[in-house]
Each structure stands twice: as structure tokens, then as C-alpha cells.
């Protein structure tokens, strides 16, 4: 697939996807999301990529779904498009996705950010779900993922006013992991991605999956899931390498099997 609205690069085991519709603040049209998910899935299959960065530009990560595509469409048109089914595939990506966000992170942009596993935000980021101001509501997880992260009260305040919060406030509510000056947010995300890319890839992916099970399962079921995942990793070559390297006082070389 030739891409029009994203650009793609890689560096030291890190795949980098940049949303690239700057004139309209990276508004998420259907084609952009198709391209993004196609590339995420390719990177997930690529053994040379261990971590993925998803970013935009300093002015906007993304200002939401493309309103031009919705304005004339009927409810039935939009239902038939089933446009959110492609979004659901993002949560099946097994490698960690690090969001590097700045500027406008609104509506579908906030929902996309919440699909990232770790988020580094610039101090200039403004994050929110303004859909109510358009007479609608979020459709790609904005009432569900936001509530799970920030809690019902903060989610209700954000969703019912439509007003964005600052990066600093988002940090207080655990919606982002770190806030850094705008000049540094991308480099900070890249540094973190490279650090995680050095870890044993199977353990990284199994830990990611286990953490999300914590939100879905009752505690004892989650504990069982964790234990079985732990046993699974004991069968990997990388755990032999990790433990042997520790005993030999050298740096491990993890190969992903
Ligand atoms: N869709 C389409 N175009 C958009 C857009 C969007 N979501 N957001 C911004 N743009 C366009 C503007 O129309 C403008 O285009 P022109 O230059 O051709 O006029 C360009 O981007 C620059 O935007 P502004 O001139 O408005 O820039 P600003 O700095 O004055 O304001 C903003 C920035 C506050 C983000 C404002 O653009 C805005 O409010 N955008 C809409 C945000 C929004 O409501 N997002 C939710 C969309 S619905 C959704 O996401 C549903 C879902 O759950 C999936």
C-alpha cells in the first residue's frame, strides 16, 4: 500500500509512524486510519522492529476525526462504513506502541493516543474529547478508555464540557507518562523506545498483554494468566541467554525466541 497520509521510518529496532496531514492538523480521515493500521500490522510482523513510535508534529498529534467526512453522512452511512472496526485492530498489536504527542490531541486524536501503551507528551499538548460541542460523542473508545484511565468523575467533566486539559493535568491523572519541553518530546520517546527495544522481545509482548488482562479479568483469573505467561517465557531461548549473561556478568543478547 502506498501511503499518502502517514510517513514511515525505522531506527535501531524502533519503527516510527508519523501522521502527515499537517494542513488540517492531522485530522483522521478513513484513509489515514487504514494506512496507519496497515503499517502497524506490518511492523508487528517485522522481526527487525521491536517497538513502535506513533507521532504527529509539534502543532498537532491529531485534532480528531475528519469532520468533512462526517458532515454529510447519515447515521446509516456511518454505521455501514463500520469505520471503527479498523480501530479495533490497533489493540491487537503485540509490540509496544509509544505515543509522542504535542499540540492538539483531540477527539479521535485523544482516542488514538489512548491506544498507545506509553505516552510522552510535550508541555504544549492539549488533550480532550470535544465531540459534545459538535452534537455527538466519541465513537472510538473515548468514553470507555478515558474512564478506565482517569476515573468516572474526571472523564465525565472532560466529556460533558468538551474542554481539553493541559499536559500537566493529564500527567496528574495518568493519561500520559511524562511531560517534557516541546523541543524534547520526540527525542524522549525515541530514547525510551530504544531502551525497550533492547529488552527480550517475547517478554515485552507477553508483559504488555498481561497488563491489559488486569483491566479485563477478575484478579484470580488475571493471576492465572500471569502465571501461565511466566511459564511460557521460561521456555524461551532468551531466558536462557538472560540468566546465563547475568551469571557470566555480561550484557545479554536477546534474539526474540
Ligand atoms: N476535521 C477536519 N478539519 C479540521 C479538524 C477536524 N477534526 N480540525 C481542524 N481542522 C482544519 C480546520 O478546518 C482548518 O482548515 P482550513 O485551514 O482549511 O480552514 C485547519 O484544520 C486549521 O484549523 P483551525 O484554523 O481551526 O486552527 P485553530 O488553531 O484556530 O484551532 C482547533 C485548532 C481548536 C483544533 C480547531 O481546529 C478545532 O476545534 N478542530 C476540531 C476539533 C474537534 O472537534 N475534534 C473532534 C472531531 S469528532 C471525533 O473525533 C469523533 C470520534 O470520536 C472519532
Image (spheres, rainbow, N blue to C red):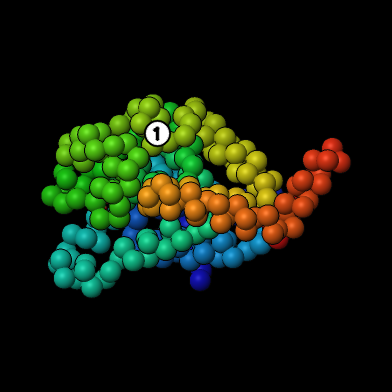
* Location of mark 1 (residue): 174
Q: Position of residue 44 (x, y in %)?
A: 56, 61
Q: Is residue 109 visible?
A: no
Name the quarter where the C terminus is drawn.
Answer: bottom right
Q: Note whether 46 is above or below 151 in the view shown.
A: below
- Image coordinates of residue 104 in percent, x first then y, are 35, 40
* 106 in relation to 15, above or below: above
Q: Nearer the viewer, residue 50 or 230?
A: 230
Q: Between 195 and 73, which is closer to the camera in this rendering? A: 195
Residue ID at (56%, 56%): 228
Q: Is residue 1 above or below residue 210?
A: below
Instruction: Tell me which residue sits at (24%, 38%) in the image.
Output: 152
**Which quadrant of the view contains residue 125?**
top left
Residue drawn at 55 percent across, 65 percent down: 42
Could you classify mark 1 by the number of other residues whose Cα lies within 10 Å: few (under 14), some (14-19), or many (20 or more)?
few
Residue nearest the viewer, comparing 172 with 151 = 151
Amino acid at each position: 500500500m502506498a501511503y499518502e497520509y502517514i510517513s514511515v521510518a525505522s531506527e535501531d529496532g524502533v519503527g516510527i509512524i508519523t501522521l502527515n496531514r499537517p494542513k488540517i492538523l492531522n485530522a483522521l480521515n478513513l484513509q489515514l486510519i487504514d494506512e496507519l493500521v496497515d503499517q502497524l500490522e506490518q511492523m508487528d510482523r517485522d522481526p527487525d522492529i521491536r517497538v513502535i513510535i506513533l507521532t504527529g508534529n509539534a502543532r498537532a498529534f491529531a485534532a480528531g476525526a475528519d469532520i468533512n467526512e462526517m458532515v454529510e453522512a447519515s447515521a446509516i452511512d456511518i454505521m455501514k462504513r463500520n469505520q471503527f472496526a479498523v480501530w479495533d485492530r490497533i489493540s491487537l498489536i503485540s509490540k509496544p506502541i509509544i505515543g509522542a504527542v504535542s499540540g492538539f490531541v483531540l477527539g479521535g486524536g485523544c482516542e488514538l493516543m489512548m491506544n498507545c501503551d506509553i505516552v510522552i507528551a510535550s508541555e504544549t499538548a492539549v488533550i480532550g474529547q470535544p465531540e459534545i460541542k459538535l452534537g455527538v460523542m466519541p465513537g472510538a473508545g473515548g468514553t470507555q478508555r478515558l474512564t478506565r484511565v482517569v476515573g468516572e468523575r474526571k472523564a465525565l467533566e472532560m466529556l460533558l464540557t468538551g474542554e481539553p486539559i493541559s499536559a500537566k493535568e493529564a500527567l496528574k491523572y495518568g493519561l500520559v507518562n511524562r511531560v517534557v519541553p516541546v523541543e524534547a518530546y520526540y527525542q524522549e520517546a525515541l530514547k525510551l523506545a530504544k531502551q525497550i527495544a533492547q529488552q527480550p522481545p517475547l517478554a515485552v509482548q507477553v508483559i504488555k498483554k498481561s497488563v491489559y488482562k488486569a483491566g479485563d479479568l477478575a484478579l484470580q483469573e488475571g493471576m492465572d494468566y500471569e502465571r501461565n505467561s511466566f511459564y511460557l517465557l521460561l521456555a524461551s531461548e532468551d531466558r536462557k541467554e538472560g540468566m546465563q549473561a547475568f551469571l557470566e556478568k555480561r550484557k545479554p543478547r536477546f534474539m526474540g525466541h
